[in-house]
Amino acid sequence: MKVISVEQMRELDRRTIEDHGTPGMVLMERAGIGSGEKIVEYINDNLYGGHVRRFVIVCGKGNNGGDGYVVARYLYENTDAEVVIYSVCEIDKLGEDSRAHAELITKTVTFSVKKKLTDDDFKSGDVVIDALLGTGISGHLRKPYDNYIEVINNSGLPVVSLDIPSGLNGDDGEFQGNCIEADMTITMAFPKHGLIKEHGIESCGLLRCVDIGTPNEFADEIESDIDLFCASDCAPLIGRIPMDSHKNSVGSVLVIGGSHEYFGAPFLTAVSALRSGAGMVRVAVPENIERIPDIPLSLILCKVKDNGSGYFSTKSLPQIMELVAKSDAIALGPGIGKHRDLIGFVREILKTDKPLIIDADALNVISEVPEIYLEKDSNILTPHPGEMNRLLEAFDLEWSIHDDKMTKACKLSQRIDSTIVLKGFRSVIASPDGRVTVNSSGSPALSTAGSGDCLTGIIAAFASKEVDSYKVAASGVFIHGLTGEISHLGKRGMIADDIADLIPEAMRRVSPFA
């Protein structure tokens, strides 16, 4: 999905109204109803019922406030919670479209004009809907918006912003003074640049987009050099499975990992690959690994000769290469540890013509001895920020270490002719052919040891049956992020062991064929 500027969005709205003949009031209705649906979905997925007693919608003077009035009506009609509206101005000060929607609801719910908010205006069980400014901010905050934003941020309550967190610049992701810290942002038609830049990344929380009916022919004319990967982009990869499928036709994965130090990582990868649809998953581990965790009986465990102390070495290669020949995609690196014997081992595996998903200490081996790396556009590298910086230095791109995530990923991808997944909230996926996207899914719930090993397994399963590494990587990252959003364990109780069980449900939410 294209990421656009505030001015491009204004032009799309203008053309939709003037050239296509869609009244502004209708666009506002679509925005508000779509947002109301997303809010109810968010409540059901993320909040315990006792935390939702009132919806408090704070409305500004502009169209963002108008969207808020439609949301208020939707929530009043479709939930049992009390609805309260705090407005910065009287109804007669609103624009025509906003006023029309306000008049449909303000006589039904509790409505107050507030020149100033206090802590007493909120209470436990409130969910705050931010419809103050949207993209209509430039320069410093003026009264009463500065007060509204400060009190809301200090309330400790769940906050949903409409279009963009109020106070945040929609183009550069910066703010002057303060901006709303949202738990979810629902943006209209297209995401705005400010949501995925600078402070926007942490200020917008979960990100959702509402279709307001912008004509496709107008949207197609918009130029954008930034893409946001969403559920609709992921769905085609999770297509229909032929009825005559069997284990060998839906992809086989080989996970090469584990060591005396880290025996659990390859199994997190392998189980995630199974749950992501791979028909057969083999796990190759050193024979002197300390212990084997409890694993699903459907995993094929392959203990291979090692260096005698629980690390892969060139002695492991005869058995490993036989397994490589039987597999459609290879996951290399989870838990292999750090040992000098690994250099020759990794060098030989890199020579395979099978798709490779390279993670963890395999990345560090490459960083230490970059000359062993063979450029191949079917390879997918999945570094976290620290690993990324080491790779940049190894491939003579140290001058890019201080660049933004997108620039870093693109530079490395083009330098080594491979797809790069730069992990973190709003992960960036870059292809050597110039395609680049920012992932839209994700949650702090995934901030747990082993989460990246699970991601490697998801990507490997997708790579076992799809040749476009960029689509494979971006789709894998999206599904991984979505598992964190839908977990019933909340943001603090989830561990990596839980991720695999959530993968099927995440795929079902994206595609009817999962």
Image (tube, rainbow, N blue to C red):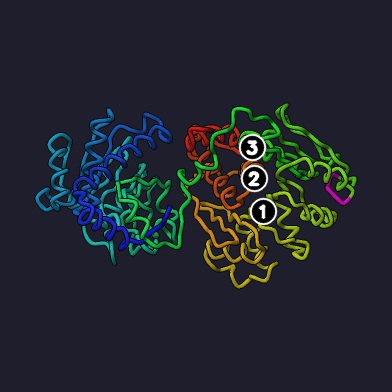
Q: Nearer the viewer, residue 345 or 87?
A: 345
Residue at 28% across / 45% down in the picture?
Answer: 31
Q: Residue reaching furthest bottom?
A: 399
Q: Is residue 340 left or right of residue 439?
A: right
Q: What residue is rendered at 15% in x and 39% in y?
A: 106
Dots 1, 2 in contact, CB < 8 A: yes
The percent position of residue 288, horizontal first and vertical second, equals 86, 40
Contact (Cβ within 8 Å) of mark 2 with mark 3: no
* Crowd rating for badge 2 (residues with CA inside 10 Å; few <14, some 14–19, many 20+): many
From the viewer's perspective, is 295 left or right of 203? Answer: right
Q: Which residues are magenta?
A: 310-314
Question: Residue 366 in the image: x percent, y percent?
Answer: 74, 60
Q: In the figure, residue 246 lies in which quadrant?
A: top right
Instruction: Determine the CA span between mark 1 and mark 2.
Output: 9 Å
| Nearer-N-terminus badge (3/1) | 3
The quarter of the picture where residue 405 lies is bottom right
Q: Position of residue 222 (x, y in %)?
A: 36, 60
The residue carrying mark 1 is 378
Q: CA distance from mark 2 to mark 3?
A: 13 Å
Q: Which badge, 1 or 2, comes first in the chain's sequence?
A: 1
Q: Mark 3: which amino acid?
A: Ser
Sequence-wise, the earlier of marks 2 and 3 is 3
Residue 114, image x and y in percent?
A: 17, 49
Residue identified by numbered label 2:
463
